[in-house]
Image: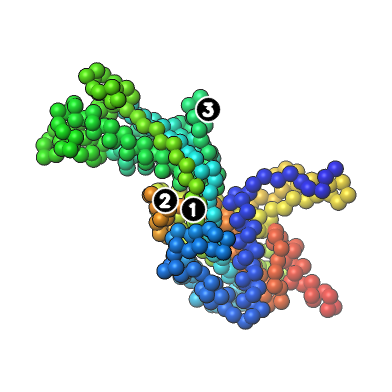
């Protein structure tokens, strides 16, 4: 009844496809021109001294060390040692290939975000914010920031999300916006709480605000041992009726900001594969990733997101495809019983490293991290496969690079000649 199936945005919507085309074109151009594919990339990466850089479409890249990231990825992947590994594979009757792909992601999303932070005397810091986690670890990373700014324990931070009775406005989690924008409004609210807390503490401790400082969750009278904890200040705000009117009530603050500037996480991945020429079967042998997310709040969470993104992208590159019956348009891959999903056994242990060049357009230097693994994965896997099949005269492979498709690409010319 229709010539187009329904679709939904893919992780890193639009960028994996664009980077696939660009990085495949670079490899094809290098082969046809006789240039080394790494040298061709080196010539075209924006140098660090040229930042900030406005591209021909008017987008302003704030900061980045693109060439350093690529060189580090090549070093970690032992690019120079690849010929020996290829020779060893050939001795075993296998075709080995290596591929590289650089990427840049443009992260925008809904530009407005709001946070309500309240310090409760019973020892809870409640953060009501309009982002929703789908497994990105917001409960941990958001709490880490509040812990750093307010000096409270990690388990005292309570994150409230997805509750339309409590959340006045929120932009959700998409386009790498959640931590990038959430951190801005949480930071502003935390600073306002500290400023208000200093004024309350000055009344309780009978000291001038100028003589107070805040560190490790306590307001301290400089040069003395007199201090009061943040949670005690929150209790005083509720119980001390002699406080000025604007200091009475719950100790909290609201920040609602609109941040229209885009952010540009980037990185470089290197993939190494072996192909069995008898069956066309692909095995991923090594995968190296260097991603720049600016200041990484929780590197372990970032690595987890990169790993998941790589696996998702590899699934598309190697096996995932929707099959429709000719004539009827009936979807034959209608469930996960028929749709080829990647399995853990398909992947090696990923070697991931972070570059942390602070973003100059973010007050905390943060760039998004959720889409970095997927964005280059399609291109780098296919680049590696094509390199492995280069001795058969193969210049390009369409996705998914199934065993049947690879076998036909390798042996099709032989059959035609016969």
Depth check: give the residue in front, 37 or 383. Answer: 37
Task: Identify the residue under disc 3.
Answer: 164
Q: Residues within 10 Å of mark 3 (few under 14, many from 20)?
A: few
Residue 85 picture location, percent across and down: 55, 74
For marks 3 and 2, the one nearer the N-term is 3
Disc 3 element: loop
Q: Where 398 falls versus 307 (above or below)?
A: below
Q: Which mark is residue 313?
A: none
Q: Residues within 10 Å of mark 1 (few under 14, many from 20)?
A: many
Residue 385 picture location, percent across and down: 64, 67
Residue 395 picture location, percent across and down: 70, 72
Residue 417 in sight: yes
Residue 191 sits in quarter: top left
Asked if labels 2 and 1 touch by Cβ distance under 8 angstroms, the answer is yes
Residue 227 sits in quarter: top left
For marks 1 and 2, the one nearer the N-term is 1
For marks 1 and 3, the one nearer the N-term is 3
Q: Of discs 3 and 2, which sits in the foreground?
A: 2
Alpha carbon separation for disc pair 1 and 3: 28 Å
For the point 82% across and 48% down, the residue is 3
Residue 401 sits in quarter: bottom right
Q: Quadrant of the N terminus?
A: top right
């Amino acid at each position: 009844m229709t010539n187009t199936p329904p679709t939904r945005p893919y992780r890193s919507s639009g960028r994996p496809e664009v980077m696939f085309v660009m990085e495949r074109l670079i490899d094809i151009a290098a082969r046809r021109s006789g240039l080394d594919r790494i040298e061709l990339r080196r010539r075209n990466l924006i140098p660090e001294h040229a930042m900030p850089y406005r591209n021909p479409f008017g987008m302003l890249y704030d900061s980045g060390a693109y060439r350093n990231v690529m060189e580090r990825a090549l070093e970690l992947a032992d690019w120079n040692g690849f010929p020996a590994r290829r020779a060893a594979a050939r001795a075993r009757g296998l075709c080995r290939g290596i591929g590289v792909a650089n990427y840049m992601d443009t992260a925008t999303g809904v530009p407005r975000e709001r946070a309500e932070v309240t310090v409760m005397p019973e020892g809870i810091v409640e953060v009501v914010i309009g982002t929703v986690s789908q497994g990105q670890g917001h409960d941990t990373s958001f709490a880490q920031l509040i812990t750093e700014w307010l000096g409270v324990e990690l388990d005292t931070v309570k994150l409230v999300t997805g509750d339309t009775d409590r959340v006045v406005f929120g932009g959700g989690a998409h386009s790498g916006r959640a931590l990038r924008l959430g951190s801005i409004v949480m930071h502003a609210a935390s600073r306002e709480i500290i400023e208000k807390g200093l004024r309350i503490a000055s009344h309780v401790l009978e000291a001038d605000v100028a003589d107070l400082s805040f560190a490790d969750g306590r307001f301290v009278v400089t040069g003395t041992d007199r201090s009061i904890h943040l949670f005690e200040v929150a209790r005083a705000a509720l119980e001390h009726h002699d406080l000025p009117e604007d200091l009475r009530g719950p100790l909290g603050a609201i920040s609602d900001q609109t941040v229209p500037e885009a952010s540009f996480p980037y990185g470089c991945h290197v993939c190494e594969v072996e192909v069995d020429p008898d069956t066309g079967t692909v095995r991923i042998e090594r995968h190296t990733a260097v991603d720049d997310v600016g200041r990484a709040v929780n590197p372990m969470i970032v690595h987890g997101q990169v790993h998941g993104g790589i696996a998702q992208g590899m699934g598309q590159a190697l096996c995932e495809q929707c099959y429709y019956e000719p004539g009827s348009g009936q979807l034959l891959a209608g469930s996960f019983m028929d749709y080829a999903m990647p399995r853990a056994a398909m992947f090696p242990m990923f070697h991931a490293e972070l570059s942390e060049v602070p973003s100059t357009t973010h007050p905390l230097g943060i760039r998004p991290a959720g889409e970095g693994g997927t964005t280059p994965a399609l291109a780098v896997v296919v680049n590696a496969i094509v390199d492995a099949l280069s001795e058969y005269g193969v210049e390009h492979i369409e996705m998914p690079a199934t065993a049947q498709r690879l076998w036909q690409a390798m042996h099709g010319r032989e059959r035609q000649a016969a």
